Image (spheres, rainbow, N blue to C red):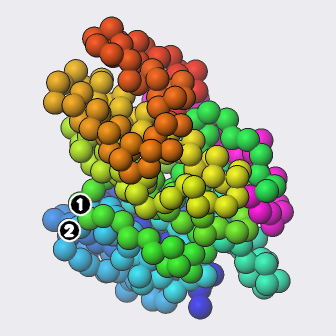
Amino acid sequence: MKLLSIAVPCYNSQDYMNHCIDTLLTGGDDVEILIVDDGSKDNTAAIADEYEKKYPGIVRATHQENGGHGAAVMAGVHNAQGVYFKVVDSDDWVDTDAFAQILATLRELVETDRAVDLFVSNYIYDKVGAKHKRVMRYANAIPEKKVITWDDVGVFHKGQYILMHSVIYRTQVLRDCGLDLPRHTFYVDNLFVYVPLPYVKTLYYLDVVFYHYFIGRGGQSVQEDVMIRRIDQQIKVNKLMAQQVDLKKVENKRLRDYMFNYLEIITVISSILCLRSGIEENFRKKQELWEFLEQNDAQIYRKLRRGIMGRVMNLPGKLGRGIAVTAYKITQRTVGFN
């Protein structure tokens, strides 16, 4: 059995996937790299097959009809043979020194029967043209180099969330939680991180900058104009987060509070994108989202709606929308989220 399975979802990735995969190959025999060609129309499939041929026992290439990012991730989960599982998108890459430290730590945890459910490390926003590249660290909230429970976790800053870039899950946790990401849907990385959290009993944090999250490729899904065009998919993920996890049943209060804050910020992002679009139809979609949240769980809805951000997002009229957008811009600058 491998120590770590890494899924690399690829769709028309021929121009950048080599750099990603080459950094992952430094993990050696402890790692299996699952290149998932999601119906690419360029040379991605041939590149994947060449890697599998050149690195047998380490690289496996999978080819499937196009199903989107979620379908590619799920193919990785279904095929994974490693104790742990990570997703690395094909336009991102990892720091090889940090990778070596992480593998050594995972190996020690497994060999000493202390395998944790969730392993957390840092990531960097590798933004094109940025002089200062922001690093997301967690040392203020998570004790380092210790096997801990949620009771040991402190308070996260606003804008500080455990995202797909920072997580390595124990593979069995992903299977036990019934993870099933929707097809042909962007932004499912939020579901990938969020849904398994109630199944995490132990975690470990290593304060190293491991994942390079590349920002700047044209048409990238996280660009605001792209997100507005795909607002239906953002809202779909938002609703699934609310549906698939009953926060009232999350036993640990610190985890429950963290997950509520996560749901809150995703709901704020959905709302602000609708408002930023300036399109009447999207204003109605925002309203419908909040109505859905109320129908899904009135108690959670009230908490979301009565919070500062919930109130601002639902200020009435054109003036209210203007205030919400201004508040968003200020928060974006001060907190620094993308």
Disc 2: which residue: 66
Q: Quadrant of the N terminus?
A: bottom right
Q: Amino acid at mark 1?
A: His
312 displayed left or right of 143? left
Q: Which mark is residue 174?
A: none
Image location (x, y in percent) of residue 180: 38, 70
Q: Position of residue 113 (x, y in %)?
A: 79, 84
Q: Is residue 145 above or below residue 297?
A: below
Residue that appears at 40% across and 57% down? 243
The front one of 54 and 28 is 28
- Pointer 2 local density, CA inside 10 Å: few below 14, some 14–19, many at least 20: some
Q: Is residue 36 above or below residue 130?
A: below
Residue visible at 35% across and 32% down?
271
* Residue 227 location, quadrant: top left
Task: Inspect the magenta stretch and tell me whether residue 134 lies in it.
Answer: yes
Give coordinates of residue 80: x percent, y percent.
48, 82
- Residue on which disc 1 sits: 184
Q: Is residue 197 shown above or below 173? A: above
Query: Which of the two marks, 2 or 1, is nearer to us in this view?
Result: 1
Image x and y of residue 74, in percent: 38, 73
Left or right placement of residue 146 versus residue 161 in this view? right
Residue at image coords 30%, 24%? 275
Work out how far the residue at label 2 is from the one at label 1, CA to CA, in angstroms: 8 Å
Q: Are marks 2 and 1 in contact (CB under 8 Å)?
A: yes
Q: Secondary structure at mark 1?
A: loop
Stretch of the chain drawn in magenta:
127-150
The front one of 132 and 167 is 167
**Figure quadrant of residue 269:** top left
Q: Is residue 91 magenta?
A: no
**Residue type, numbered disc 2:** Asn
